[in-house]
Image: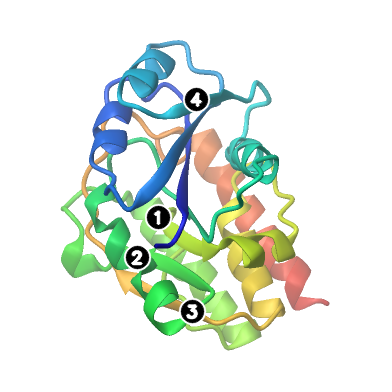
Amino acid sequence: MANIKVIIPAVNEGDSIAKVVTEIPDSVSEIIVVNNGSTDNTVENAEKAGATVLTENRKGYGYACLKGMEYVDQQSKKPDIIVFIDGDYSDYPEELDKLVAPILENDIDFVVGARKKALREPGSMTPQQVFGNQLATFLMQLFFRAKFTDLGPFRAIKYEKLKALEMGDKTYGWTVEMQLKVLRKKMSYIEVPVRYKQRIGVSKVSGTVKGTIFAGVKILGWIFKYSLK
């Protein structure tokens, strides 16, 4: 049986984090919630739900993901697969088994949960999120002949392949960095359509003008950086 671990970056997700943790399938060996500066009861609720809780005080989605990876790296028994999912309950955690299936059954290196329009709850993605995803994936198709259609945060990757990517982005560019490096290193990848619903609470990225602009700049910056290599 594959050793699967889940990393969940979380900032003030006290109302949602327990739902995410408890609905993750039993096929997962450990759920790691990385508290990234929460001022609510995120930590308490995550622990009560059965998650391992780490603290990363440096603010940033990438910082939180890297903290989770650092923790896993120090374990004597390394996982086969790492899954990333947000703590806002916008994804359906029970779909994790569907997400890792291409890795287990077809030896695919990397899987993105694609939030297809037909499977999205109305209003679950803001217009700027939809536009940003379309622009980013169009540019990846243009420059790298990529087949990605989404930068969805619900994703699974072989642990050894994740280590080989040498991830470094500390903030909003984490997802696109991963996809660009998968392309650059010619790893196998696939998208699996997943459902998507309105999140609990306010988004730290698309819910603010500053967050939206900063995320857009970071994403485009990574794409143009790699297109010039």
x and y, in percent, of residue 10 in the image: 46, 30
Mark nearer the viewer, 2 or 1 = 2
x and y, in percent, of residue 138 in the image: 51, 77
Q: CA distance from mark 2 to mark 4?
A: 23 Å
Amino acid carrying label 4: it is: Val
x and y, in percent, of residue 199 in the image: 27, 38
Mark nearer the viewer, 4 or 1 = 4
Residue to which mark 2 is pinned: 99
User: Are the residues tagged 2 and 1 within 8 Å (C-beta)?
Assistant: yes
Residue to which mark 4 is pinned: 53
Mark 4 or 1, nearer chain start: 4
Q: CA distance from mark 4 to mark 3?
A: 29 Å
Q: CA distance from mark 4 to mark 1?
A: 19 Å
Dot 4 falls on a residue whose secondary structure is strand
Amino acid carrying label 3: it is: Ile
Q: CA distance from mark 3 to mark 2?
A: 11 Å
User: Are the residues tagged 3 and 2 within 8 Å (C-beta)?
Assistant: no
Mark nearer the viewer, 3 or 1 = 3
Closest to the observer, 54 or 17 = 54
Vertical comparison of 145 with 23: above or below: below
Residue to which mark 3 is pinned: 108
